[in-house]
Image: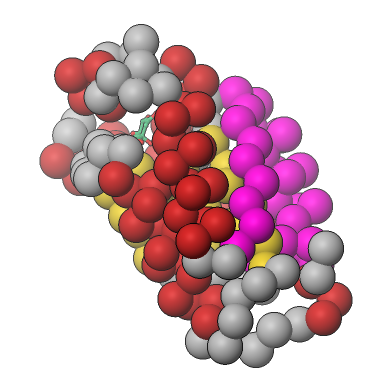
Amino acid sequence: MTNSNRSVLLLSGPNLNLLGEREPEIYGSQSLEDHVQAALQQAQACGLKLIHLQSNAEAELVEAIQQARGCHDAIVINAGALTHYAWSLHDALATFDGPVLELHLSNPNAREPWRHTSVIAPVADGSIAGFGGYGYKLAIQAVAELLSDTPQSDSYDT
Ligand code: DQA
């Protein structure tokens, strides 16, 4: 089944706008723009559209998830620190029908104990963590696989 006309929303949470400058020993030297470009390239190769939004504000991310209903087919989200406590993101994602993929550059489970809890994981189809920038490519590949297994809905065509 083709994925053409299917659309993925890539969401980036707080402080990810500082990637490249922020703790490069943990998050690497690439900027968020570099990661988005890698995701875009992979999306194109998989026949998917990709829209990216970064916000430092929880409310804006909740709004974007709500708006994604009926207009995007899948969500890839690196919620940054909101991953660990933002139940409003959990609840918003629970209302989304398509595949949801949790993404992290680092491996939060190998870091401080407070990072071991994810409120996103229970409403995600799967998580990709610890592969650095390569995770963006892997996330889009995973989403393309998941979408190719689900029937295409005309109402999602944009
Ligand atoms: C992160 C991991 C989070 O614990 C952290 O707060 C971030 C980035 C990651 O991509 O590794 O901001 O989501």
Residue 157 against residue 60 in the figure, above or below: below
Q: Nearer the viewer, residue 154 or 54?
A: 154
Magenta segment: does it hold 28?
Answer: no
* Quadrant location, ligand no. 1: top left
Q: Quadrant of the C terminus?
A: bottom right
Q: Is residue 47 left or right of residue 103?
A: right
Q: Quadrant of the N terminus?
A: bottom right
Q: Is residue 46 left or right of residue 92?
A: left
x and y percent of residue 147 in the render?
55, 77
Residue 113 occupies which quadrant of the picture?
top left
Q: Is residue 153 left or right of residue 34?
A: right
> From this viewpoint, which residue is outermost toward the left?
110
x and y percent of residue 78 in the render?
46, 42
> From this viewpoint, which residue is outermost toward the top?
21
* Residue for point 34% across, 24% down: 30
Residue 140 against residue 41 in the figure, above or below: below
Residue 112 against residue 71 in the figure, above or below: above
* Residue for point 60% across, 75% down: 3
Residue 11 visible somewhere in the drawing: yes
Q: Nearer the viewer, residue 24 or 91?
A: 24
x and y percent of residue 29 in the render?
28, 19
Highlighted range, magenta: 48-74
Looking at the rendered structure, the number of numbered marks drawn on it comes to 0
* Residue for point 65% across, 89% down: 151
* Residue for point 60% across, 23% down: 56
Residue 91 visible somewhere in the drawing: no
Magenta segment: does it hold 51?
Answer: yes
